[in-house]
Image (cartoon, rainbow, N blue to C red):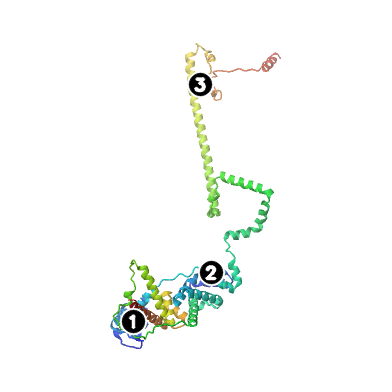
Amino acid sequence: MKYEGQNKGENGIQCVDFDARLADVLDGTMSGAELEAFKGHAAACNDCGPLFTQAQAGMQALRSLVEVEPPLNLVHNIIARTSAIDPAMARQLAQPRRTLFGRMREFAAPVLNPVVRVISQPRLAMTTAMAFFSLSLVLNLAGVKISDLRHVDLRPSAITTTASMQYHQTTAKVVKYYENIRFVYQLESRMKELTKDATKSDGNDQNSDQNGNKKGEQKQQPDNTSQKPGSNNKDYSLGEGEEILAVLRFELPGMVQAQNNGRIS
Amino acid sequence: MPVPTEESQLTAAVIKRCLGGDASAWEEIVRSHNRRIYNICYRFTGSQDDAEDLTQEVFIRIYKTLKSYDLERGAFTTWITTMTRNLLVDHFRKSKQDRVTDSMDAAPSADEDAPTLGEHIPDEKPTPDAAVQTQETQKMVQQALQKLSPELREAVILRDLQDMDYREIADALKVPEGTVKSRINRGRTELARLLSRTYRQVN
């Protein structure tokens, strides 16, 4: 070859060294004064100069080649051919890959299979269906949707968190409900007190106006509860020392006779 | 002795599973390396059919001799490459294809002032016919590659297409590192000359 065995020594580099260093230069691993010397030799030497240019161009041409796509069935064909060598591996490859669910089902099969056999009997089918229906109804009423459940919700920590949240939410609702009821009762009680006070002051006014003139007129007046709110439960809110405005006397005939007998005896 | 990397340890684990009869481990090996081996075979033979057959042959050979692989003696990729290279050499000898390998010592062209290959290779700028040009260039480079001697061809394929370092190539080809560098230089240079000649013929 042209560049072999020649020893020109331009720029401190001999032609025999040029070939050895060419790869390093093209790889970009040479730098500094060494690289300058190499380039100087390439520019000065009539043999090494074209060699450098051609090697560079050849490398660029090779690296411009793109990776080709292997045929789609290549992997399948390779495995088919290697499986022919080892039938045991072929059987193993022919088995479908077991998923986590599949493995769990396989693990629980000894327990689940008898249960499934029993509940799939016609006489129990309706019972099973009703149980399933009831369960789904309860879940639906409780606001649980199976479709909303994710595997992350079934983690112990997630279950604990959900249960705790549900408990606190329910407690808060109950407390709020009773607080509201309490407020309503207090308001109602206050209203009653106000009504009583108003009634009392009206009664006093009426008494002062009518006292001495028409003492029994109140008896003659019809029920005036429609004009005074709260007076319809007057008997229930009667306190100590309050004046009784009207009394209904209702006595059974037997009671009268018994009372009379008692007086006689 | 090479220091075991994380990758080599993973490979060793997969090989161990495979040797233990785990079919999925073997499938994993095939899926990991089939593309690379197919590309080496395709670039060496220039034929998709031959590349497919040879890739299958390589994997059959790997499957049969997997027990003999020793992690401490080198990377699995290098071991596979050596096997591929040996099979390609066998194929090259058996096929007795016409070795139209232009000699490096051939008389240089009279037209030394002809444009260099670098001027012929399309630059990075996209042009309307870029795809067609690229396809044509790829075809010409592949044809020129077929004309290289197998020693030079395998060296440049492993270096410039498979991006292996000189040490790995030297291990795979069982030759000294200096020889690898020399073959790569000669392969690149000869390829450039072949391409220049082709361009001159076309134009």
Chain under callout 2:
A
Q: Is residue A64 visible?
A: no
Residue A13 on image: x %, y %: 32, 84
The residue under label 3 is: A226
Amino acid tagged 1: Leu
Residue A214 x/y as whole percent: 51, 11
**Earlier sequence position, callout 1 versus callout 3:** 1
Relative depth, front residue between B91 and A172: B91
- Regarding residue A188, the answer to whether it shows in the image is yes
Q: Mark 2 points at which residue?
A: A76
Query: What's the distance in space between the residues labelled 1 and 2, CA to CA?
Result: 45 Å
Are the two marked residues, 1 and 3, in contact with CB atoms closer than 8 angstroms? no
Q: What residue type is labelled 2?
A: His
Name the kind of residue labelled 3 in the image.
Ser
Q: Where is residue A31 in the image (x, y as percent from the top left)?
A: 33, 77
10 Å crowding of disc 2: few (<14), some (14-19), many (20+) = some
Task: Tell me what residue is drawn at x 68 percent, y 49 percent.
Answer: A122
Give x and y (percent) for residue A46.
Answer: 30, 84
User: Mark 1 — on which chain does it sit?
Assistant: A
Q: Residue at x 32, y 83 (%)?
A: B109
Tell me which residue sits at (52%, 74%) in the image: B56
Q: Mark 3 lies on which chain?
A: A
Residue under label 1: A51
- Residue situated in front as seen by the camera: A8 or B110: B110
Quadrant of the image containing the C terminus of chain A: top right
| Local SS, label 3 | loop
